[in-house]
Amino acid sequence: MTDIPVLGVILQFLGYLLDQLPFIAHAAVAVAIPIALAAMCGVMCERSGVVNIGLEGIMLTSAFVAWIAGVVALSVLGPSTPTPVFGITLPLLIGLVAAILAGMAMSAIHAWLAITVRADQIISGVIINIAAAGLTGYLNTLISKQSPLGAGGFTPLSIPASVSSLPVVGWLINAIFAQGPIAISAFAIMIVLQVYLFRTRWGLRTRAVGEHPRAAETVGINVVRLRYRNVILSGALAALGGAYLSMELTTSFQANMTAGRGFIGLAAMIVGRWSPVGAFGAALLFASSRAVSQAILFTKPAGGLGEFLGSIPPQVYDALPYLVTIVILAGLIGRSIPPAADGQPYEREAAS
Amino acid sequence: MNRARQLLLQAWATLALPFVAILLALVAGAVVIILSSALVPGHTFDPSLPITAYQALFQGSLGSDNARVETLVQAAPLLLAALGIGLGFKAGLFNIGGQGQFLMGAVASVAAAGALKGDGPLVAIPLSLLAGCVAGALWGFIPGFLKALSGAHEVVTTIMLNFVALALLSYLVAGPLRLAKSPQPVTAAVGDAALPIIMGRDGHIGIIIAAVAVPIVWFLLFRTTLGFQIRAVGANPDASRYAGMKPRRMIMLTMTVAGLFAGLAGAGNVLGINHQMSATFSTTVGFDAITVALLGRSHPIGILLASLLFGGMRAGAALMQIKAGVPVELVDVVQSIILLFLVASPIVRRVLRLRGAKANLGTTDTISRTYGSEVIR
């Protein structure tokens, strides 16, 4: 191994990545979407001063509700022909709406515990996670015995080969748009949230409430109401991430199918420094480590490089996002500082 | 007479809230059972189904000698891990890493048992348990060190380390520790390091170890200078620093000891029950232990009682599923509702006019407040 010039190996690896770029980029986006949606939910909560480690539970609940609402809607309404684009049917839409409502309901519980009860927000998040795992597991065991017919899933947009093979931008268009509706809208949500958070009055108020609620209150911002609204609304984002898992990536629910994506979302939020674009970027970065490992599995690069890459255990790619987060949190590379009032319950001063 | 009455009132003040929370959670669980029974095909409305389920749960946890032993077997790892997490709460630390510390302890003890093959139980058992303790302690030390070094919040780092532990475990079991020629990735059996059975079918000696840990932790917390310092740092890090204590050192130490307990729990489970590890080895102990520590209000005696309750529920859940058709996951549902009522205690107290019961969950109210702007000097 040591005889191979290092520079040559690096160049060969870069060449390999470039060669595999269309595959890696597309796979990375598919993996990143639920993580990014969870992370943006976290951004919205924590920017307004509420810690949310219940992302995983909100996603899991929504993944389950999306599926079960689809099952019920299908059995009531009967099958219908899906639209040619995205394969949308009425039961699928009902499932999606139900999932969003369920996610917002879970968020509302968290908001109530964090804001009104002023409970420890970490414990509140733990409750959301345990309750979601318990309830979905419980209902899934009861229901899956009958193996009910699900409403299926959304289908990805088909990009004509003439577009996806365009030079320079073809792979990018393919990666972003050869996806289902939830994935594509996640990109739109990222842009909207970024603009709203940093360019509008709502965004300024949200950030003020997250940094210094007392000062925000003195200029007439209703801290409690704004926090409630943001936390509950943010639930819709994590809910989309959950619905993506059970109606776009797959077409049914499995027990504990989020498998830690909510927690990687938390990591992406931190690495992305509490901004929507940053969080999305971090999610893509985390996902591309998985996508590269998939690419290596399918098409091994030639020669010594292939042998070396093939010998890296796949668990390294699994652990990488978490290790990166720990390193960044410890301030070894850059520094990531949460909003100042993050996690602190707000108590209005007595009106006497 | 007056003194006895005062003691009784005091006991009620401490126990009322957990007791009410458990009771309400069981009622809520019954509602879940009844409502969800409509999902079973060909169901007939049966209002006594929750009673059947809880009877089976009770029978499976306390109804026979074997059931009682099973309860203790299930309670032992919860007790150990929750003692560690409770210690963290006392120091103002929220250790969500019980899961990772447990897994690291388990895999390290299997590795040690493999290396000590043929050395006889007298050598293999203590050294394998020790390996589990060391690995768990290391997995607890890392977040403690990071917090002391740069203020990286332990909630996030321990969550991340849980997943790193999962990946590391899967790598070790599929790679270096894999039993040669086995179709699935599993480790070799622990052999001599298997813990001796002291009661019933599978009541291993880990039960005794866990029980002994209770007075040790109690003594450490309430009768030593170290314990006083841990509690002082948890109550007010700034004040304790001005009093000459070293909060950073306490944080590292507490996290390490917490990891040690969780690691010991993992080692005890794998040496006492599983006797080998597969790549998909999973457990709910890490998260259950958080609930146990909260329900027990971070007090060793409270944690002992709470771990027996949860051990019993885990032990009886299987029989409940067989006899009443109620899935075992009901235990998780009940568990989360217990936590919900504990956390919402100000409201519970107001509604039920519980005057004596204090609202706090120990010292946890200082934890997530430090999330945003934590600087530990």
Image (tube, coloured by chain):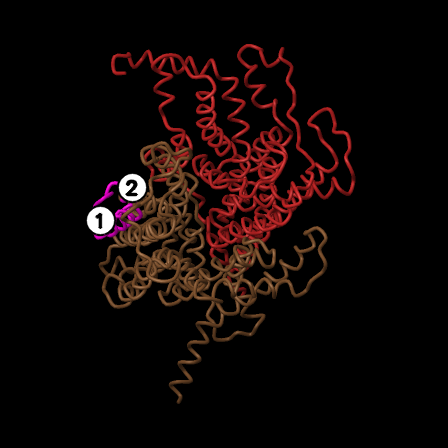
Chain colours: A red, B brown
Chain letter belonging to callout 1:
B
For the point 40% across and 88% down, the residue is B2
Which residue is disc 2 drawn over? B111
Image position of A151 (left or right of A51): right
For the point 55% across and 15% down, the residue is A169
Depicted A326 relative to depicted B330: above or below: above
Depicted A12 relative to depicted B168: above or below: above
The reply to whether residue B313 is visible in this rendering is: yes
- Foreground: B375 or A6? A6
Q: Amino acid at mark 1?
A: Gly
Instruction: Considering the whole magenta stretch, tell me its main secondary structure.
Output: helix
Q: Which of marks 2 and 1 precedes in the sequence?
A: 2
Residue A319 in percent (x, y) is at: 40, 34
Q: Cα distance, mark 1 to mark 2?
A: 16 Å
Which residue is disc 1 drawn over? B120
State the extent of the magenta-drawn residues as a range. B113-138
The reply to whether residue B148 is visible in this rendering is: no
Chain letter belonging to callout 2:
B
| Number of other residues with Cα within 10 Å of mark 1, as a class: few under 14, some 14 to 19, many 20 or more | few
Q: Amino acid at mark 2?
A: Ala
Numbered disc 1: secondary structure: loop
Q: Quadrant of the N terminus of chain B?
A: bottom left
| Number of other residues with Cα within 10 Å of mark 2, as a class: few under 14, some 14 to 19, many 20 or more | many
Residue B180 in percent (x, y) is at: 34, 33
